Amino acid sequence: MVGWLITGMDRAMAQSNPPFMSGVPELLLLRLLDQSEMYGYELVRSIRAATGEAISLGEGVIYPVLHALERNGLLNSRRKAVGGRTRVYYSLTGNGRKRLEELQTDWRRIQGGISNALETPSHA
Amino acid sequence: MPSIDLSELQNDLLRSGVAPRHVRRTVMELADHYEDLVERALARGAETDEAHEKACDDLGDLRDVAMAIRAQPELRSWAARFPYIALIVYPLACLVLLPAVPVIVGAAHAGYLARWVLCIFLSGLVTAAMILFLQLSIALS
């Protein structure tokens, strides 16, 4: 019964706050690519720099996220030869910009809610 | 010089039904990323072996990469996404359409086909005329 309740609660939370933690990599990638086109290694370095090393991940997992975003029409990619190596550069599409705006709005709403909850004095 | 082996990841992804073009691209990007990490570590003064070890650590566990890719249904090949279509409907459709292929191709190239038939007919006519001429020459000589 308790398990069922928790599962139901998780589902409800996921429905009302879909991009909570699961949307963080997507949000960061879209935000960085909104500024300029980048390739995977460059993106990882930028994420580390932009978040003050607060978010560290196995760097290889960035590629499945990038490929899925591209497949969903949020990113474009192009191959570019640099120093004898071929790199895949990613940039934001129009749909990617719309998605970024949605994610930013959702994230600010959640961030505001959590800040309020942290600032509210707890009652014993 | 030690290097990263991505062949296991590649085979694992292909066996899991990930589209080959995504597999090739992922492997290419990971190898490039790895080279960047090695160069960075070397530039910071690491020894070669140490640089490769650090690059492997930074790249992360390749099983996590494989898991993340497998979790994206949109990265799978159409045959993996629709196995019944790939294994039953597609071969059956091919079997049904196979006899129709010559007819369809013939209709699409009707002009060439007509010229080809005409040429064969004319060459047959010339050959028959020559044989007739030879037969008559023999008979009348």
Image: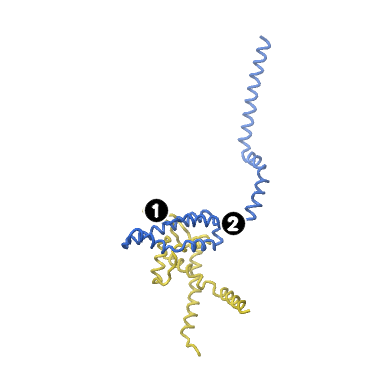
Chain colours: A yellow, B blue
Relative vertical location of residue B141 with respect to residue A57 in this rendering, above or below: above
**Label 2 residue SS:** helix
Task: Characterize the local packing of mark 1: few (<14), some (14-19) or many (20 or more) Cα atoms within 10 angstroms.
Answer: few
Q: Are marks 2 and 1 in contact (CB under 8 Å)?
A: no
Residue A42: give x, y in percent of width and height. 40, 62
Residue A85 numbered mark, or none: 1
Foreground tag (2 vs 1): 2
Q: Label 2 is placed on what type of residue?
A: Ala
Residue A87: give x, y in percent of width and height. 42, 56
The C terminus of chain B lies in quadrant: top right
The N terminus of chain B lies in quadrant: bottom left
Task: Characterize the local packing of mark 2: few (<14), some (14-19) or many (20 or more) Cα atoms within 10 angstroms.
Answer: some
Residue in the image at 32% along x and 63% along y: B44
As drawn, the residue found furthest toward the top would be: B141
The span from disc 2 to disc 1 (Cα, nearest Å) is 32 Å
Q: Find residue B48 and report its image quarter.
A: bottom left
Task: Name the one closer to the observer, A24 or B23.
Answer: B23
Residue in the image at 52% along x and 53% along y: B20
Task: Name the one closer to the observer, B93 or B133.
Answer: B93
Using residue A122 as the reference point, say whether residue B117 is left or right of it: right
Q: Chain of mark 1?
A: A
As drawn, the residue found furthest toward the bottom would be: A124
Task: Name the one closer to the observer, B61 or A81.
Answer: B61
Using residue B90 as the reference point, say whether residue A34 is left or right of it: left
The residue that mark 2 highlights is B80
Count numbered badges in the picture: 2
Q: Chain of mark 2?
A: B
Specify whether residue B23 is in view.
yes
Q: Label 1 is placed on what type of residue?
A: Arg
Specify whether residue A93 is in view.
no
Residue A55: give x, y in percent of width and height. 43, 70
